[in-house]
Image: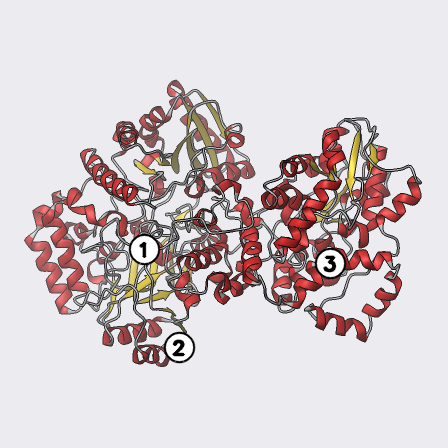
Amino acid sequence: MDRRRDSELSPDAAQALRTAVRGEVSFDSTSRALMTMDASNYRRVPDAVVAPRDAEDVAAALAVCREHRLPVVPRGGGTSIAGQATGVGVVLDFTRHMNRIVSVDPERRTAVVQPGVILDELRRAAGAHGLTFGADPSTHARCTLGGMIGNNSCGSHSVAWGTTADSVHELDVLAYGGERVRLGRGERTTGLPARLRDGAEALVAARLALLRTGFPELPRRISGYALDELLPEKGADWARAFTGSEGTLGVLTEASVRLVEAPGARVLAVLGYEDEGAAADAAHTLLPHKPLTVEGMASDLVPGAAAARLPKGGAWLFVEVGGADAAEARARADALCRAAADGTTDRDVVTDPARQRALWRIREDASGTATRMPDGSEAWPGWEDCAVPPARLGGYLRDFRGLMAEHGLRGTPYGHFGDGCIHVRIDFDLLTRDGVRRFRHFSEDLADLVVEHGGSLSGEHGDGQARAELLPRMYGPELVGAFEEFKDLWDPAGGLNPGILARPDRLDENLRFASLPRKPVDVEFGYPHDSGDFSAAVRRCVGVAKCRTTAVAGAGVMCPSFRATGEERHSTRGRARLLHEMLAGEVVTDGWRSTEVRDALDLCLSCKGCRSDCPVGVDMATYKAEFLHHHYEGRVRPAAHYAMGWLPVWLRSAAALRSAPLLNAAARGPLGDLGKRLGGIAPERSVPELAPEPFTRWWRKREGPSGGGPAGAERGRTVVLWPDTFTEHLAPSVGRSAVAVLEAAGLRVVLPPSPRRGALCCGLTWVSTGQLDRARKVMRRTLGALAPVLGSGLPLVVLEPSCAAALQTDLPELVDDDPRAAELASSVRTFAQALDQYAPDWEPPRLDRPVAGQTHCHQHAVLGDAAERRLRERAGLTGELSGGCCGLAGNFGFERGHYDVSVACAEEQLLPSVRSAPAGTEILADGFSCRTQLDQLSGRRGRHLAEVLAEHL
């Protein structure tokens, strides 16, 4: 079998795939680049990506690959952590078409699914019948059933419901040789070719003693092939033997799986312990109480703000118990806490579902947050999920910590303490030869330590390339030889996922970082969290794929463009992959001029949602601005960059000429249509009207010639109101209302001094269009004008969330050589934050009505909305604002070609929440974009919170 790494398909093979397969067949650099990596340390470049429509398409693709001796790699959500979802040859992407739930049978408690079904979609369908799927890895919102079967995934509820293998009933599989088989237990297995059936019987018969004694007894033994499931006393369960084979034996086309009854109520007991070892020692003692989960983590993983919500201690066990109703679940939780009391430092029983979800998010995001050490240095998987007998977990963890210290490494263990399974990201240096050598030596020593404790090298995520090389240390050469024989019986040509599990590549080959530049590339932003290194910023994406979640959770935002299109290249992960390949220069070869990266970033809304929602803090809005700057440097830009990137200049010119009435009239006629075409604006959009009187003109009339400026202002009772472009020229009523409310709260309002030339501006529109030289010039001018404000220490109140976010993040990261930038960023307050901090005793007018609308995505990602929530509560404005993104996102929704995606984003949460709002509901939207989107798509007028409060003063 050809094990090529860099080759392209022959024209004959490419044409044969196009002819034979009805689904998409892609050979372009974008499609291939998106599939080079999963969530592991490894990278392999495929020759083609095929998205089959059904099992017949899979069979057709396999036939072509056999004829042309091409390797095949089945792939689901690409969240595997050991490298088994990467490969050369042809990648079969099951997420695009083969993603249906065929049936759910509540009587038999089974479901039939295609391999590309997302776990949470199955859980929702089963939940309608009071059922669920037992295994639930932390990636449940984006991992696929096919991938879970391939890896024998587990999750936090495995102490109650076992691994995926425990939920597998029957599997429809295509072998590389074209054979169609149905795998089950005993006689339910049909279609096995005589070669495979007879060979497997002989393999088992020749090694009965070895298969009965050679596998460790523990709940999380995932490593190797499950050949012991073919023993006669186990009924020759071929479905279980296939589960966990990591795409190396056959290609799954359909699965019948078992469902379990979901408890009527769940209660979370959080138990505090002195340290990690104490929590690990206690975990197995809780199992007799039949918990649903026993998850553990220590203080070095939990952020300070999150730790404040947990019981006192240095480590915690999250123990979920269930019951037929809330009272039974609570009683079981109380009984468990009493039994555990002697060893705990503190405990808490959480019954509120919202609080339970918030606490579980700490655990579920750990696979991302653990990739950064407290000092900001990088940490990686590799030894992500070893498992030992639960009763030996405490001793193993102490030895594990000692081994890390011996090798000069650091990591933050956490995981499934009740099953003896530990996850950890370790600060391996995978960029240098010496670092990679240490990675290998540590891996070898840790494999020996796991075996010494009676454990499994993999306890959840499979062996892949990360651990398969070391399987002889766990199983010995004879059993590993049996694995290879089993592989050959299924796949004599070696065509399925070569280099994985059987005859594996070395664990230090194919590392994803080997192709990246060794020196930092020249960039414009400072990237303070990545030591100024753009490559390190891009490396943040480890592939956990939270951005591929198909339904936004609660107030979350990331990633609206992926949810609108369903395409990997429009996810945060997909864009990060393309940027990685751009830096590598092997698949994407044009560097900053890459059209592949440009096209993928085109539908990025720059919502900044990933900055807060991504567990590792990928900031695609900044990366997009950086890329656009270099991509168009010295070249003509798209018309929209001039029309909307320079919007502050055009609006200021219109105000100076007092031409708002004339321009508003022209925008409604044929000249307006012409202007939109010339400006690259979507024809479906209406151009917002200019205000006849800008905010600062109103202010000057009100204050007179001596008004404004911070000189002599009383610190603590004076605030400086920022006249952002949108408030100034398009929504001055927001500014007037804010002045009224702030003054009613007893604050003195002043405006900052204007610069000698130009106007105050945060530079947002230039940043979002990648015109960073101009943005920096505007920002420096603003810093100069604001020197008196910064010197006075007064807060700067910014009404437009996107401008506040730009001043807090974009400005100090783009003008990182000016210490005043950090001063300015720290002075920024939102309207609600100013009232909360400087007028805490003021009582707002009581409105007592429900609200609907949206929290601005930049507010969610950068500023936070705690003060806004408190202010709404004090004013009697009840209910939650929706999450997600409005879809207009500044210039994005106005640009030609973006309208459909813009509307799809709005239809996700914002528009439904407003349409379903009862009469008398106050529609809130602090962002000008959100209000404009509401007005143009729903005809409903949203208002800034300042306007609502001012109306009722």
Count up the numbered dots. Answer: 3
The percent position of residue 321, horizontal first and vertical second, equals: 43, 35
The percent position of residue 242, horizontal first and vertical second, equals: 24, 57
Amino acid type of the residue that numbered disc 3 sits on in the rendered structure:
Leu
The one nearer the camera, 718 or 823, is 823
Q: Residue visible at 7% across and 55% down? A: 205
The percent position of residue 942, horizontal first and vertical second, equals: 76, 52
SS at badge 3: helix
User: Which corner quadrant of the image does residue 892 belong to?
Assistant: bottom right
Screen quadrant of the N terminus? bottom left
Q: Residue visible at 41% across and 47% down? A: 261
**Above or below, comparing residue 36 to residue 210 in the picture:** below
User: Which corner quadrant of the image does residue 946 belong to?
Assistant: top right
Structural distance between the alpha carbons of marks 2 and 1: 25 Å
The one nearer the camera, 74 or 758, is 758
SS at badge 1: helix
Q: Please state if 852 lies on the left or on the right of 708 as rendered.
A: left
Q: Nearer the viewer, mark 3 or mark 1?
A: 3
Task: Give residue 22's mark.
Answer: 2
Q: Please state if 368 lies on the left or on the right of 867 as rendered.
A: left
Q: Residue visible at 63% across and 58% down? A: 769
Identify the residue under disc 1.
149
The percent position of residue 176, horizontal first and vertical second, equals: 24, 68
Task: Give residue 647's mark.
Answer: 3
